[in-house]
Image (spheres, rainbow, N blue to C red):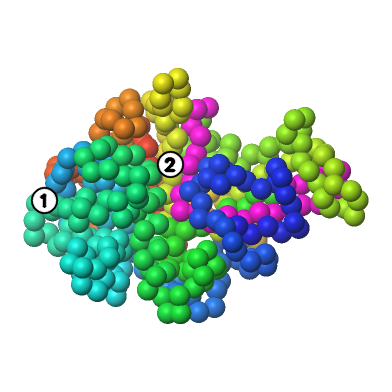
Amino acid sequence: MIVLDSAKGDGSPAANGDGTSARAGGKSASSPKAGSRGVVVADALYPREHIRMEWPTVRKVGSGLANLGNTCFMNAVMQCLTHTPALAAFCLDGEHRRFRPKGGNGGGGSFSAIYEMGEHVCRALAGERRVVSPSAFVKNLRSISKTFRKGRQEDAHEFARCLLDAMHEKCVEHARPKPPKNSPRAETTFVFQVFGGRLRSQVTCKTCGRKSDTFDSFMDLSLDIAKAKSVEAALKRYVAVEVLDGSNKYKCEMGGGKPHMTRATKQFTIDAAPLVLTVQLKRFEYVPFGRGKLTQFVEYPTSLDITGAMSDANPKARGVEKYSLFAVLVHAGGSMHSGHYYCYVKAATGVWYEMDDEGVSATSERTALNQKAYLLFYAREGT
């Protein structure tokens, strides 16, 4: 987390309470030098300009995945990641093999999520098998998150977040010299360069007029859909200005005077946009005796324009930020820890497919757009 102007209290977003899966904490308090294209760091672990956002070759859709006992949550996420063009290009080029653990996964070496993901992508896209097994991930589920249990249905969003974190952390581990955790250089791994972005929380004191900026990294955006009929509407609500007043007043320590409680406004915006934007539609909410599910349809576009959600929302000054949809993950059922997960992916051929564990079947874009989506995967256009 980076805080400018020493703002405290209500000006700082709570960990993971701002609608993101954040990777914050312990960064230097220097002003970040970045725009929508990401933070520029000397000696990056993986230069952003080396990332290819297109498929390296036109390939058939990937293989189906064996369900090894309530692993549909895992299978759906892995299909979405396998059909992420930037990740597929990285893996098919063999770049993941530099992260192979000594002794091999399960052979005396520690589990390497980035290496095993790369091997899985290569197997799935080779076109040699109708079905492949994600057994290495099931076997090492606790290495991805200690809260996961074999044979138990897990939340697909949580699995996606933890898997990307595990892949990112393994990249950091292999760096020489190894950068401090959460340092700007640590956030230049291939994984973070593709999936990572930065959020700005800006508090404006209505007494002295000073602004306080807090920055947090994120790997996905979680959008409230309770009162939204579309992703665009949910995103607009996400960046709407919030008034801090009454019992929620802001403690201002600026202006040269004594700290005082005052009226203020707070706004979240995207300060640095990721190359691949993962959006969670918050369908699960706490209700008595558990978590309920919001089952309404929320419209989502094939081309998503997030320009208005950027910290600098002037397209003439910064350019337009548009994203193309390439994967849709769906949860069928009434509870987070039950039901069934499956997904729709756009193959390198441009054809959409439904991926349901072992089942792989061609479908239409219209069908892919007519789902009660839980996770959406977008790739930035024009990169």
Q: Amino acid at mark 2?
A: Gln
Which comes sooner in the sequence, label 1 or label 2?
A: 1
Name the secondary structure under disc 1: strand
Q: Image quadrant of residue 25?
A: bottom right
Question: Which percent across, then down, holds residue 260?
Answer: 85, 43
**Magenta-drawn segment:** 203-227
Circle 2 residue? 280
Quarter of the figure with the N terminus = bottom right
Q: Is residue 325 magenta?
A: no
Cα separation, mark 1 vs mark 2, equals 28 Å
Q: Depth check: give the residue in front, 110 or 247.
A: 110
Residue sitting at 40 percent across and 63 percent down? 169
Q: Residue 287: which quarter of the image? A: top left
| Prevalent SS, magenta region | strand
204 to the left or right of 118: right
Could you tell me the amino acid type at mark 1? Val
Q: Secondary structure at mark 2?
A: strand
